[in-house]
Image (tube, rainbow, N blue to C red):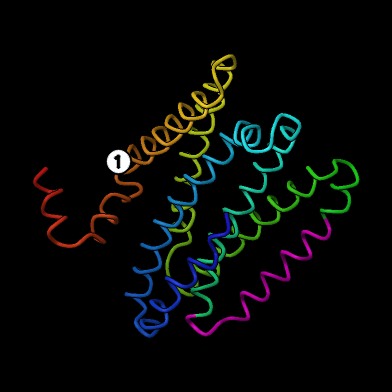
Amino acid sequence: MEMGGVINSVVFPAYSRIQEDLPRLRAAFLRSFLIIGAAVGLISALIIGLSPDIVRVLLGKKWVAAGPLMQWLAVWGASRALGQANSSLFHAVGRPNLSVIFQAVMLVMFGAAVFPMTWRYGLWGVGVSLAITGAVTQVLRYPLTAKILKMSVSHMYVRTGIPLSAAVAAVGVCFALRSAMADVWIYARLVTCAAACVGTYAGVLLIWDRFGAYQLVPTVLDLLPERFRRKVAVA
């Protein structure tokens, strides 16, 4: 799930154009980070929840053991995608050194973790090391991002924590369904679990939205052309 290049190509030019206008830059970053977080959370939930069956369908039964590795790599990919959103901001405001520093921190953390983890757990240990390194480094980026944009760091944690809660719920539902449908044709199980995963994820986000804690729907509507917003408002 390498979304970093796509994210950078989209948001970096926008951030660069408004880097001198702090209120606009802050609003643009928070809006884009919210949408990126929601998308990354859904993709991660689908990969983690469906990976055992995906591996079995694509590679065969003998590769089923690779499912857990795929799940940990999904966490790593999510951290990378969110990290790229922060790095695009660092570059846009003329602080590319921060991206270099965090890359070095990641390298040191991964190097310290990967050897003992690989020695003890094999390839699975590599995936765990990547996931932990990515997640910890991402959290460390948030205070600096908040300082650059002169805002509370809670804005960052909300935009990560709410999709995380939705992803956890979606994966839990997916695992429960997969267990209940153990004897069902694998393709039917895969489709059913995927639909349940997406539905649960969207439902949790909408609940947060309903209580005003997330604001995903208004943010998405703001991105739509005026005529579509009017149609949605009428509906």
Residue receiving disc 1: 211
Q: Is residue 85 above or below residue 54?
A: below
Image position of 34 (left or right of 55): left
Q: Residue at x 52, y 27 (%)?
A: 187
Image position of 161 (left or right of 179): left
Q: Residue furthest left?
A: 234
Q: Amino acid at mark 1?
A: Phe
- State the quadrant of the C terminus: top left
Where is residue 54 shown, x and y percent of the image?
Answer: 60, 36
Q: Residue at x 66, y 48 (%)?
A: 73
| Magenta residues (range) | 92-112
Res 20 quadrant in image:
bottom left
Q: Is residue 99 magenta?
A: yes
Residue placed most toward the observer, 36 or 209: 36
Q: Residue furthest right?
A: 119
Residue at disc 1, secondary structure: loop
Q: Residue at x 36, y 81 (%)?
A: 18
Residue placed most toward the observer, 126 or 206: 126
Where is residue 220 shown, x and y percent of the image?
Answer: 29, 55
Where is residue 87 shown, x and y percent of the image?
Answer: 55, 71
Res 221 quadrant in image:
bottom left
Q: Residue at x 59, y 56 (%)?
A: 79
